[in-house]
Image: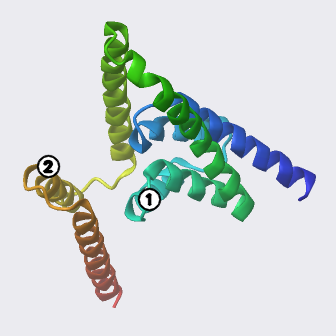
Amino acid sequence: MEEKEAVKCSKLFITFLKIGAFTFGGGYAMIPLIRTEVVDKNKWLSNEDIVDIIAVAESTPGPLAINSATFVGCQTAGAKGAAVATIGVVLPSFIIILVLAHFLRQFEELKAIQYAFWGIRIGVLTLIINALLTMAKECPKNILSYTIAGFAFILVAILGVNVIIVLILCALIGIAASKIQFKKMGEHRK
């Protein structure tokens, strides 16, 4: 591995190790920190790239955090970058779960532990809302986008339709809409 590539890979590993270690609540809670580290601090990718990566990571099998780390690593430093970013984001959780599994049963009845988890839940909710607002800023703002979002929300939150089915439906609607739009653009040019 070239020295420049090794430096980039080690920086990717450390960045995603931090993200994995200091973000509770899973993939959605990690989105603001991933954006800050990848776009603002390191300037590896743009905001638009992050929105695309989150969309692809959400649409592919596996946890959002791991998929996002893999895609960012791949975009930044190829296959080696994907590997080190993925290992970096997974390692803290693995170690924490290993330790907690051993000790949590002994302390779960303590009020301080219960309050700590209550506080963590509130923090996670805040991070998820932040991710929603950040992604909403980057999404197209038109009647079709709002309709698809409302439709998806009703299907998932109210009717309990499987998320995978909703994602596939949304993708198909997006493909159909873009084909119609390109067809109209072609007709206008004639």
In the picture provided, is 14 more to the left or to the right than 16? right
Image mark count: 2
In the picture provided, is 142 more to the left or to the right than 29? left
Judged from the image, the secondary structure of the residue bearing numbered disc 2 is helix
Q: Residue 169: x and y, percent?
A: 23, 71
Q: Quadrant of residue 34?
A: top right
Q: Residue at x 71, y 38 (%)?
A: 14
From the viewer's perspective, is the residue at label 2 or at label 1 nearer? Answer: 1
Q: Is residue 76 visible?
A: no
Q: Residue furthest right?
A: 3
Q: Which mark is residue 87?
A: none
* Nearest to N terminus: mark 2 or mark 1: 1
Q: Residue at x 33, y 38 (%)?
A: 133
Q: Residue 179: x and y, percent?
A: 31, 81
Which quarter shows the N terminus? bottom right
* Tag 1 residue: 62
Looking at the image, residue 153 lies above or below residue 18: below
Q: Nearer the viewer, residue 137 or 104?
A: 104
In the picture provided, is 98 more to the left or to the right than 127? right
Q: Which mark is residue 157?
A: 2
Which quarter shows the C terminus? bottom left
Q: Residue furthest bottom?
A: 190
Q: Residues within 10 Å of mark 2 (few under 14, many from 20)?
A: few
Q: Nearer the viewer, residue 8 or 39?
A: 8
Q: Residue at x 38, y 63 (%)?
A: 59
Looking at the image, residue 123 lies above or below residue 141: above
Q: Nearer the viewer, residue 12 or 145?
A: 12
Residue type, label 2: Ala
Q: Residue 134: x and y, percent?
A: 39, 40
